[in-house]
Amino acid sequence: MSPLLASLGRSLGRLMIAITVIIGLSVASPANADNWDAESLTIKSNPEGALVTFSEKDVKAGRKSFNQSCGACHSGGITKTNHNIGLDPETLALAAPARDNVEALVDFMKEPTSFDGVYSLSESHPSQLNTDIFYEMRDLNDDDLEHIAAYILTAPSVQGMQWGGGKIYW
């Protein structure tokens, strides 16, 4: 087989895999309209427990921004650099301060700290403090950060235990 045909075959194989993954994600995606209801779109707004209801459009925008800015390390709600810390509600609630509400997640995306809240992660974790290093955060405004937080906090209601479950469920 000629090198050109072999290269073409490999490229076609990669394309087929990519198409299969995209189709699989769109079928099992939380973006399916029938999965969203008022209950799953209502989440904690702040540490005091005030509730806020986002629109499906807002959460989908948050999903897109999450995938572009956070998805490389947090695909499916896991943390690839530390599998003990996921984006599931139970883990977020155990952080110091608790990150199980919109206000706290937005604060983290602006000024990230370690899970125990003691150390700044601004030099190693993408945030609004280091957009010169982590360009994926550069164009995100406060609304975008709120939508990302809304996606993170509503994903468990739609995806169930798979969100943040990593290898256990995938």
Image: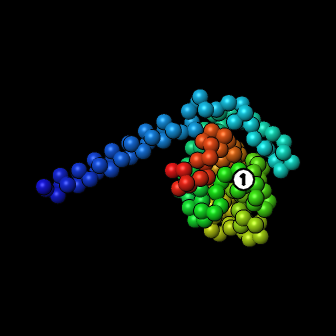
Residue occupying the point 71% across, 67% down:
114
Q: How many marks?
A: 1
Picture coordinates of residue 91, whole percent (x, y): 70, 56
Secondary structure of the residue carrying numbered label 1: helix
Q: Position of residue 57 (x, y in %)?
A: 63, 34
Of 62 and 90, the residue lying toward us: 90
- The colour mode here is rainbow
Q: In the picture, which quadrant includes the N terminus? A: bottom left
Percent coordinates x, y for residue 49 in the rendering: 84, 45
Q: Quadrant of residue 59?
A: top right
> Where does residue 169 sit, x and y in percent of width and height?
54, 50
Residue closer to the observer: 136 or 39: 39
Residue type at mark 1?
A: Glu
- Outermost residue, top direction? 34
Q: Residue furthest right?
A: 48
Question: What residue is drawn where x is 68% and y is 67%?
Answer: 121
State left or right for residue 71 relative to residue 89.
left
For the view shown, which residue lies furthest in the left direction?
Answer: 1
User: Does the rendering let one see residue 71?
Assistant: no
Instruction: Determine the image quadrant of residue 45.
Output: top right
Mark 1 lies on residue:
90
Drawn side of residue 153 relative to residue 48, left or right: left
User: Dot 1 surroundings within 10 Å: few (below 14), some, or many (20 or more)?
Assistant: some
Q: Can you see residue 34?
A: yes
